[in-house]
Image (cartoon, grey):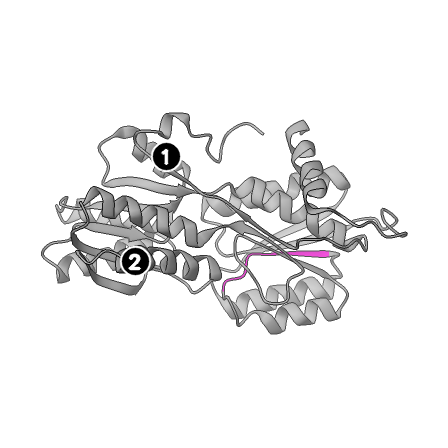
Amino acid sequence: MRDLKRLLTGTALALGLATGAAAQDKELQSVGISVGLLGNPFFVATIKGIEDAAREINPDVQITSVSADYDLNKQASQIDNFIASGVDIIMLNAVDAAAIEPAVARAKNAGIVVAAFDVSAPGAEVTVMTDNVAAGRKACQYIVDQLGGEGDVVLINGPQSSSIIDRAAGCSEVFEANEGINVLSDDQNGQASREGGLQVMQGLLTRFDKIDGVFAVNDPTALGAALAAQQLNRSEFIITGVDGAPDVEEALASGNSLIKASASQDPYTMAAQSMEMAYEIFQGNTLEEDTVLLEPELITSENVGEYQGWTAAR
């Protein structure tokens, strides 16, 4: 916990908190968390970060975590349920970059602090996320470099949350800057899941006889794409993703996976920092900066041994 305390103290100092007279007077009693998909280990790590940060503030805080399953209507209903139960703070991983706005507005009108993590949400008072444009750039620049600037590539897209939109934009920027790169497909939705990546990649492999590179918007999608390749006995391409997830960390370390790189995120730190900033808003304080972008690191088979991943001791 000492590391978490240092992180949160450093965050407060870096953001230049302006403390109001009523600061520290309000007790944090309840927090609601809605994430895109609880089946994704990334979101398990974010929830752990939020829980640890919240319990540093109040060991008895009530925390409720729910999965939206990338369903906008389901997430909007979850927010309404949090409003009805009177939570103090909603920690939100928005499944839609724009359409969640009315639900966020309802929560704020009810006096609830809404903090976004991993992806932005219109109206949220705090946002902490990876620089996802940079993540897409780094993962796709790796593909371009490995192909020597020439080849046929695909981009497996996903649900239109801000993080996925930004990753796809960063990747497309790199591909478009290299005349020798031919994008075969960039609009197939792999649902940000292993099953979705498997299904989309099966279709792409059936459709295209030769693929040189694949960018998947997150690691579960990349793992699904690799499984599709294995099932169809295709191995002429390389795959990159975003997350630095434990399964991809293992694949990179093995040295025999089609997945060759991933732009890593730190879900625990990201979510803990968002929770601490939300608490400052809850106390009536003002943040000089309400949005924090964390720089991704490109993890490859060459440097994976030095990578401190999601399961590293905190």
Q: In this image, 21 relative to 311: left or right?
A: right
Mark 2 or mark 1: whose residue is earlier in sequence: 2
Q: In this image, 135 relative to 269: left or right?
A: left
Going 50% across and 57% down the picture, which residue do you hit? Answer: 36
- Tag of residue 156: 2
Looking at the picture, how far across and down is residue 205, in whole percent? 16, 56
304, 137: nearer the viewer: 137
Q: Amino acid at mark 1?
A: Glu
314, 306: nearer the viewer: 306
Looking at the picture, how far across and down is residue 164, in whole percent? 42, 58
Crowd band around label 2 with a 10 angstrom C-alpha radius: few (<14), some (14–19), many (20+): many
Q: Is residue 94 magenta?
A: yes
Going 73% across and 46% down the picture, which residue do you hit? Answer: 16
Looking at the picture, how far across and down is residue 64, in whole percent? 65, 52
Q: Is residue 233 magenta?
A: no
Locate the N terminus and report the quarter of the image it occupies: top right
Going 25% across and 46% down the picture, which residue do you hit? Answer: 143
* Residue range (magenta): 89-95
Q: Amino acid at mark 2?
A: Ile
Q: Which residue is mark 1?
A: 249
Q: Tag 1's secondary structure?
A: helix
Q: Are marks 2 and 1 in contact (CB under 8 Å)?
A: no
Q: Tag 2's secondary structure?
A: strand
Q: Residue furthest left?
A: 209
